Amino acid sequence: MRPREKLAKLGENRLDDHELIAIILGMGTSKFNALDIARQLMIKYRTLRRLKEASLEELMNEHGIGLAKAVSIKAAIELGRRLALCQESAAVITSPEDVKTLVMEDMRYLDREHFKVIYLNRKGGIIFIEDISVGGLHSSIAHPREVFKNAVKRSAASVILVYNHPSGDPNPSQEDIETTRRLVEAGQIMGIEVLDHVIIGDNRYCSLKSRGLI
């Protein structure tokens, strides 16, 4: 069954990654159809995370992919990222799973460490989300001053720390634990509770509160 027919009959959630990409590509070449090209893409890049990181030029170097197809792939991936973020304004955080749902698709593909803070009102509703710092491949700095200054400005009742591990492994390092404890202590002094620190990996996450580290 061709990918388009399969989607129409079974639904998009029943298609593999390369089948969805084949639909985005549309047409193949005289030697290879769109499914063949899509399959070769996923063999090379292995995951959608790595495919997202490919530049237009790198995609255009693949057999059967010109500017139009490369742009279509990049546009489709960006739409997926934006869809994952569009629920922010109405979101209420009640668990680490809510945090994972909110940020996973945006943060799991990042190739550098990003430290974000989710600022919440007294009912757990999101006031806003801020990028605090972008580190190198192996380090990111989160200073209490940067974390809490906007919490005071926006009258946030609590915050949730969010951090990604580009390796894909969300298990906390000793540095992660020490940074978290320092921010928890600073929040206690200011009367702004640090509810959790959620570390994002590749489709996995770790809640330091759930592990008893907060």
Image (spheres, rainbow, N blue to C red):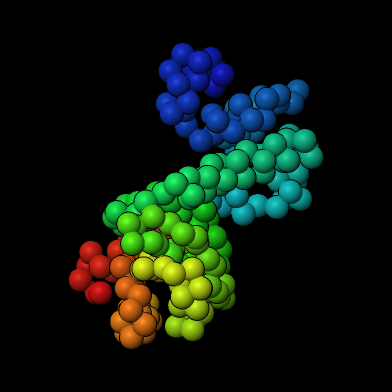
Whether residue 162 is visible, yes or no, is no
Q: Is residue 32 left or right of residue 198?
A: right
Residue extending furthest left?
212
Q: Residue at x 47, y 32 (%)?
A: 16
Figure check: 136 above or below 210: below
Residue 124 place in picture, x, y as percent? 34, 57
Closest to the observer: 32 or 80? Answer: 80
As drawn, is 11 to the left or to the right of 51? left
- The answer to which of 70 and 182 lies nearer the viewer is 182
Q: Examine the rendered structure and indicate whether residue 25 appears above or below residue 44.
A: above
Return the x and y of residue 18 as percentages of the image width and height: 54, 34
Q: How many marks?
A: 0
At horizontal 45% and vertical 83% (from top left) the residue drawn is 144
Q: At x 68% / y 25%, what residue is drawn?
A: 26
Toward which corner of the image does residue 195 lie, by quadrant? bottom left
Q: Residue at x 72, y 40 (%)?
A: 70
Question: How far from the left and from the top, in percent, is residue 44?
Answer: 58, 46
Give the percent coordinates (x, y) of residue 201: 41, 59
Instruction: Inspect this view and state whether residue 123 appears.
Output: yes
- The reply, left or right, for residue 210 in relation to residue 166 is left
The quadrant of the image that shows the C terminus is bottom left
